[in-house]
Image: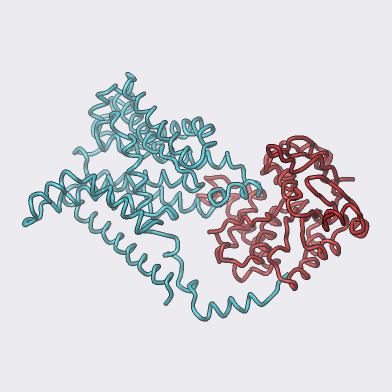
Chain colours: A cyan, B red
Amino acid sequence: MNQSSTNTNLARAFTIGAILAVVLLIVRYSQVRGSVVVLMAINAVLALSLYLPLMTGQLSLASPGFYAIGGYIAAIFSTKVFTNVGTPFPIPLIIVEMAISAAVCGFVAVLVGIPALRLRGIYLALATIALVEILRVAALNLEITGGAVGIFGIPQPFATIASLEYLYIAVPLLLFSMFFVARLEQSRVGRAFAALREDELAANAMGINPTYFKVLSFALGAMLAGVAGALAGHFLNTWNARQGTFDASILILAYVLVGGSRTFIGPVLGAALLSALPELLRDLGDISGIPAWLVSFFKDGRLIIFGMLIAAGAYFFPYGLITPEIFRRRKRELTPRALNKAAVQEGKSHL
Amino acid sequence: MNLLESQGLTRRFGGLVAVDVVSFGVQEGEIFGLIGPNGAGKTTLFNLMTGLIPPSAGRLIYKGEDITNRRPYQIAQLGIARTFQNIRLFGTLSALENVMIARHLHTKAGVLQGVFGLSPAPQEEKITYQRATELLDLVGLADRAEQKARNFSYGDQRRLEIARALALEPKVLLLDEPAAGMNQNEKHNLSDFIRRLRAQFNLTIVLIEHYVPLVMGLCDRIAVLNFGKLIALGAPEAVQNDPAVIEAYLGD
């Protein structure tokens, strides 16, 4: 066996391990802390919202900004507009809030995207960080967003706060988002996205309008982030300027990088794993017989461990845990038969 | 009548004049050769003609219409397709995907139609797949449609670029050094292949080529560039015997 197939097998093993880990984490936390599982699903949607602009090769860290907008829209509508709707808060109204969030975020994204997407690479990332900051400072100072205090007591659609029942909304949303991205990748628009990611100049020469499709991918990502924010607003019960900050930009980027940025499964898995990580470390600290200093490191140094994992992931899995290659069937690998066939084709002159 | 016309196209890069007031017209249905020593400005001229870089001066005329400052995708919409000297395939995508992408202008489905399989997406997908497969077959790559473009040999990548350009259903096809990286046998077959393309797709072809026997045997007319200037234009025999051309190629 050659080097590349060994690597592919190793990658497959890690992928299966990661999926198993996610399943185990879901089973464990749905028993004790349901909120973790809901967060896993919401964060997976956020990871997909970063993946969408990445489909055209645009690294946008603006998702938390749109997530914040979505949260405020849900908070404002449910506390100020949809009053007298009784308790628990009707789920259809949450879906209405999600739709409004998607529309507003899409509109803002188009306005911001047309000038911002003239930038590339790290400069675009910086511009999108600036957008997140602008929105945060605006939220801190506006009256409608509740200033520094934020908005409290966002109505709940279920009997308890942060209930596991939120999965009834979060899981369909995640499944729909995955379906959406998967189908998009196989469509005309998805192919235009991929062409822009691979070689913008060549795509341009093939008749693909780069600005149009880059803004489109940016806006689709923004809409998804806004929808996730609207759900998170209800789920977290309170919304303020600490939601959707630059920290969240980096976390969401970590989901995509650790999971793998070349297929939509990667961000979803990365988000599920890393969202559960802080809770997992807290649990580790509860195991008896562990030295006290390690327990306190697990509890207080969670973000340090998080950072180290991201760095280690970037070193050992530069393409993330999930790569398109592992889905490819084995027949494409270089077996002697395939090599022989290739050699025959080389000899044939077709022109 | 000229289908595509360069009227004094000029491009300066700082102090260097890469293309220096070049004027010529390409007639409908002809195979037009663009030759010249290295650094003569041939590829820059191609880039000007496809909108990849804007000209410093001069005009580009297509079917009597001034298209000088159009963007590359707008020029592609008019029916002008090209290949690249330094191959620019979508490397990590399959050969089939590369060609399907280039059917972009002949399909319309938006995000929602594509995602939910609403009309016209399903029909379009079927035709796109069909046409792409036909074109891969035409260039002899149909049996490797699923392989990544970057794993192809140099010559096969050139063939794939031609298939991709043809997927645009262009009226004018610009080929930038199509024979580069091909062996003698393949170069010989390339002439026949390009003639066949012209007949089959009703094409007007402009090609840059270093391999002189190919150009002389294939082209109806030839333009010779040297240091950005057009030094000769005409039938192959006339150009071949032009003293200015001989000097440009052999030096003084």
Which residue in the rendered view is the most extreme toward the front? B252
Count the labels in the image: 0
A83 vs B199, left or right, is left
Determine if residue A225 is in view.
yes
Determine if residue A173 is in view.
no
Which residue in the rendered view is the most extreme toward the left? A289
Between A119 and B16, the residue placed more toward the observer is: B16
B72 vs A325, left or right, is right
Residue B72 placement: quadrant: top right
Between A146 and B56, the residue placed more toward the observer is: B56
On the image, the x and y values in percent for residue B82 come to 71, 52
Between A156 and A153, the residue placed more toward the observer is: A153
On the image, the x and y values in percent for residue A258 come to 35, 53
Q: Is residue A329 above or below residue A232?
A: below
Which residue occupies 81% across, 56% down? B202
Which residue occupies 49% across, 75% down? A334
Which residue in the rendered view is the most extreme toward the top? A143
On the image, the x and y values in percent for residue A184 come to 50, 50
Q: Is residue A301 above or below residue B178?
A: above
On the image, the x and y values in percent for residue B96 come to 60, 62
Which residue occupies 29% across, 22% down? A146
A55 vs A69, left or right, is right
Looking at the figure, which quarter contains the N terminus of chain B?
Answer: top right
Residue B15 placement: quadrant: top right
A39 vs B79, left or right, is left
Looking at the figure, which quarter contains the C terminus of chain B?
Answer: bottom right
Which residue occupies 43% across, 36% down? A126
